[in-house]
Image (spheres, grey):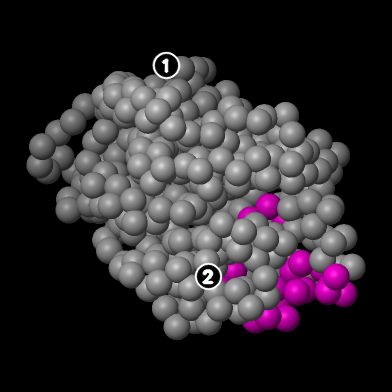
């Protein structure tokens, strides 16, 4: 097994009622042989848009703002059931990649809540404030109807400062304050965004958000174009998320300040972004991309495999407010099981490196959510069945 405390061999992980209760020689209860696997904590996808599965592969090879306009056109026409089926497929795909928790921004948080309880995957989601598509009053009504449960956390989603007016952003902040939750937002993603914001408002995006009082509630995604003084502001935020593949694919340029944020004590997490902008939901692959993009952008090797592994496990659970991301007593029993024969050579000093730089989500054969085991083959078959329904629905639209 591998977690942030290192590598241990030939140990038993004892699980009871969704929690790890012992790690070592204890053999109480039913035994399941995992000798063919390397076990790690489950991974958290800290930013995605699962309902966009139906748009995967559509209008690729465009820059962000052109791409967004095309996505919004299709989303206005889409059926509610299309979002629902897409969301379930996305959850099952993530489970097959060892993802045990996620943060979602889309238009059907009720479905996310339902499926998170059904499968035992930890989810944070909310209705999305996006003025060109959603009436803010309707978003507020939906948001107030969402209830926290064992696996679901209602959060406030604000698409961005360029798609949401100031009155709506203030409403989002007031809701977060009243409902005691946090705000998930795309921020400082492109050079166009920061130039437009500075020209119109006289402030950079993080400065503007801070002026409106959102910083303490903030889970800020992308941050490819931020200044050093804006990072100082973000020390007071809840968290940040780096989505390297999506940033490269949509040509947003800039560079997420991973090292600087980490050194300032800012919680750094990793997300795949959506299945229409990445187009994968493979968080394992995303860890490698994060390291490579940092090294390409900064010309140094300060960000290591351990940094991205931490961001995708422990830091993701910090964001969710759940005691997870380690394999030790008292932590939730959310685990990923890698095929150990695909990670050879299995030298202790190479295991972390092989997981981050060699493996993908395809190397994961089983995922444990709250103590329940899911087999990759069974998940794949279920995905195929739901895809048949989704594609049939899309053909009729």
Q: Quadrant of the N terminus?
A: top left
| Residues under numbered marks 1 and 2 in contact, where contact means CB atoms less than 8 Å apart | no
Residue annotated with mark 1: 341
> Which dot, 1 or 2, sits closer to the camera?
2
**Between 31 and 46, the one nearer to me in the picture:** 46
Q: Which residue is situated farthest in the left direction here?
A: 29
Measured from the top left, where is residue 232 in percent x and y? Answer: 75, 72
Tell me if residue 220 is in the magenta stretch. Answer: yes
Q: Which residues are magenta?
A: 200-223
Task: Answer few, some or many: residues within 10 Å of disc 2's Cα (few below 14, many 20 plus, some between 14 and 19).
Answer: many
Q: Position of residue 165 (x, y in %)?
A: 67, 71
Secondary structure of residue under mark 1: helix
Residue at image position (85%, 70%) is 200
Q: Is residue 320 above or below residue 121?
A: below
Rendered residue at 53%/82% (across/down): 174
Name which residue lies at 39% across and 22% down. Answer: 339
């Amino acid at each position: 097994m591998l977690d942030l405390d290192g590598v241990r061999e030939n140990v038993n992980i004892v699980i009871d009622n969704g929690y790890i209760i012992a790690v070592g020689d204890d053999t109480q209860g039913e035994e399941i042989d995992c000798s063919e696997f390397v076990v790690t904590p489950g991974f958290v996808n800290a930013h995605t848009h699962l309902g966009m599965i139906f748009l995967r592969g559509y209008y690729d090879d465009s820059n962000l703002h052109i791409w967004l306009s095309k996505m919004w056109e299709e989303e206005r026409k889409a059926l509610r059931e299309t979002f629902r089926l897409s969301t379930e497929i996305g959850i099952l795909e993530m489970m097959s990649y060892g993802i045990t928790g996620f943060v979602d921004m889309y238009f059907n948080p009720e479905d996310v809540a339902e499926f998170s309880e059904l499968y035992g995957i930890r989810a944070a989601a909310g209705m999305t404030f996006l003025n060109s598509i959603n009436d803010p009053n309707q978003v507020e009504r939906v948001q107030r109807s969402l209830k926290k449960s064992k696996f679901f956390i209602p959060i406030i989603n604000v698409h961005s400062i360029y798609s949401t007016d100031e009155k709506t952003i203030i409403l989002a902040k007031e809701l977060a304050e009243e409902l005691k939750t946090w705000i998930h937002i795309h921020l400082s993603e492109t050079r166009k965004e920061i130039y437009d914001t500075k020209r119109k408002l006289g402030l950079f995006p993080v400065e503007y958000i801070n002026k409106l009082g959102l910083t303490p509630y903030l889970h800020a995604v992308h941050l490819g174009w931020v200044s050093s003084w804006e990072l100082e502001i973000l020390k007071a935020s809840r968290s940040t998320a780096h989505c390297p593949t999506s940033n490269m694919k949509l040509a947003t340029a800039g560079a997420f300040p991973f090292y600087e944020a980490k050194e300032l004590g800012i919680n750094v997490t990793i997300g795949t972004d959506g299945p229409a902008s990445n187009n994968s939901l493979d968080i394992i692959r995303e860890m490698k991309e994060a390291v490579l993009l940092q090294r390409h952008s900064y010309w140094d090797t300060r960000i290591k495999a351990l940094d991205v592994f931490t961001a995708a496990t422990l830091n993701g659970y910090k964001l969710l407010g759940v005691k997870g991301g380690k394999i030790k007593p008292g932590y939730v029993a959310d685990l990923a099981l890698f095929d150990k024969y695909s990670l050879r050579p299995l030298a202790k000093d190479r295991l972390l490196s092989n997981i981050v730089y060699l493996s993908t989500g395809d190397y994961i054969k089983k995922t444990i959510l709250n103590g329940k085991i899911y087999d990759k083959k069974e998940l794949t078959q279920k995905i195929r069945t739901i895809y048949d329904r989704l594609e049939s629905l899309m053909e009729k639209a």
